[in-house]
Amino acid sequence: MVNKEEYRTRIILTASKIFSHYGFRKTTMEEISRALKKGKSSIYYYFASKEEIFEAVVLYEANQLRTQLTTAIKEVDSPQEKLRIYIYVRMKAFAKLSNYYNAVFDKNLDHYEFIEKIRSRYDREELAILRLLVYVGNTRGIFRVEASEYTAMAIQTMLKGMEVPLFWRKRDIDINDRLEAILNLIFNGINKR
């Protein structure tokens, strides 16, 4: 007997690879069913459409990202290290979670309502995490921040600005140097001391 949840997860993981390779538009239900070595009807039992599968794939990857980030920042106590690790893990994970990245940033998918919900949720969650990291560092006297909300927004904006060159080229462009430059700017600013 087939465990329904296990098979649903198998569909999601298989579809994830196909969407990553061909993109959302070029992927077909036929390709997904062929990769699973099952008929399309067995997939339609779990998902009504390709869009529904893509949504499940994107949510699965979003949960992976969230888990990686929360696990990573729980492992250290220093607010600076938490922020440093958050930024590194976030940028490296995005490079691997191509379906989630495409859903969040591909303007060709704007007409899908679930995409906008995922984008909004991601932005809210990230801003909350960054705000908390900045607030804790500020209350411990490690950071000197007047408004943690705006500082968190500025950090988020910097990270989003880094995504464009990182993901357009789809190759390693020495992300570590770029991350260090951002971290140096965050922690030290540009004013001469």
Image (cartoon, helix red, strand yellow):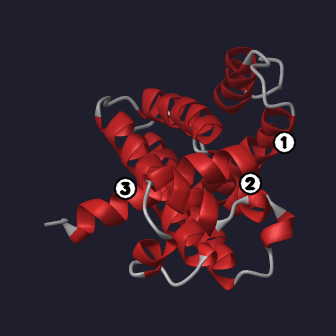
Q: CA distance from mark 1 to mark 3?
A: 31 Å
Residue 43 left/right relative to 163? left
Q: Quadrant of the N terminus?
A: bottom left
* Amino acid type of the residue that numbered disc 3 sits on in the rendered structure: Arg
Which sits in the foreground, 158 or 174?
174
The secondary structure type at the circle numbered 2 is helix
Q: Position of residue 51 (x, y in %)?
A: 63, 76
From the viewer's perspective, is residue 92 above or below residue 113? above
Q: Which residue is denoted by mark 1 in the rendering?
A: 164
Q: Which residue is denoted by mark 3 in the rendering?
A: 10
Is disc 1 surrounded by few (<14), some (14 to 19) or many (20+) residues within 10 Å?
few
Q: Is residue 73 visible?
A: yes
Residue 138 left/right relative to 6? right
From the viewer's perspective, is residue 60 above or below residue 179? below
Numbered tag placed on residue 23 in the rendering? 2
Q: Is residue 131 visible?
A: no
Residue at (55, 37) in percent of width and height: 93
Residue at (37, 48) in percent of width and height: 67
* Amino acid type of the residue that numbered disc 1 sits on in the rendered structure: Val
Which sits in the foreground, 156 or 106?
106
Is disc 3 surrounded by few (<14), some (14 to 19) or many (20+) residues within 10 Å?
few
The secondary structure type at the circle numbered 1 is helix
* Amino acid type of the residue that numbered disc 2 sits on in the rendered structure: Gly
Sequence-first tag of 2 and 3: 3
Q: Are marks 1 and 2 in contact (CB under 8 Å)?
A: no
Q: CA distance from mark 1 to mark 2?
A: 18 Å
Q: Position of residue 109 (x, y in %)?
A: 78, 70
Sequence-first tag of 1 and 2: 2
